[in-house]
Image: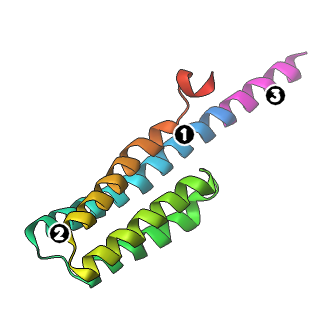
Amino acid sequence: MVKSIIYTLAAIALCAALFIFTEYYVGEQFYSLYSATEILYDKVEEGKATENDAKAVRELWEDKKSRLHIFIPHNDIAQIDFYLSEASGHIREGEDGLALAKLEVVRHMAKSLPSAYSVRLENVF
């Protein structure tokens, strides 16, 4: 009986540690994407963004998404890919207004997606 209680408490502690790590890790990955997107957004607003700036943000995202597939669904990752690709194309073509719109969506997703997958009461029920 004592062993069962100890094993159960150990399993609960391990699950709690996993949930805390996952929430922290996913949040950090999206925070760095948000920061990079924010810098690119500001450059586009000022008219100073280059294709290399957009490429740097896309490369950062490629690095992040390879590790995020474990934690979040592919569809959310694909949406960010889609909007970053479109923003990159608009920057290349000099269409700053359209690039800003796409980058705004990426910024919003980078802020909202981590909370959508965190352990909260509204996400459980």
Q: Write the residue at 51% across / 42% down.
A: 23
Q: Dot 1, crowdedness within 10 Å: few (<14), some or many (≥20)?
A: some
Going from N to C along the chain, the mark reached first, 2 or 3, is 3
Residue 58 is left or right of residue 52, and the answer is right
Going from N to C along the chain, the mark reached first, 3 or 1, is 3
Any mark on residue 7, and which?
3
Going from N to C along the chain, the mark reached first, 2 or 1, is 2
Vertical position of residue 100 compared to residue 5: above or below: below
Q: How is the image coloured?
A: rainbow
Vertical position of residue 94 compared to residue 77: above or below: below
**In the rendered image, which quarter is residue 15 located in?**
top right
Image location of residue 86, percent across then percent down:
38, 70
Amino acid type of the residue that numbered disc 1 sits on in the rendered structure: Tyr
Main SS of the magenta part reads helix
Amino acid type of the residue that numbered disc 2 sits on in the rendered structure: Val
| Viewer-nearest residue: 80 or 62 | 80
Vertical position of residue 124 compared to residue 91: above or below: above
Q: Write the residue at 55% across / 21% down.
A: 121
Image location of residue 46, percent across then percent down:
8, 68
Q: Write the residue at 18% across / 76% down.
A: 49
**Element under label 2?**
helix
Give the number of the mark in front: 3 or 1.
Answer: 1
Task: Please say if the residues under marks 3 and 1 sit with CB atoms less than 8 Å apart.
Answer: no
| Viewer-nearest residue: 86 or 14 | 86
Task: Give the residue number, with chain letter if any, for mark 1.
Answer: 117
| Cα separation between marks 2 and 3 | 55 Å
Any mark on residue 44, and which?
2
**Element under label 3?**
helix
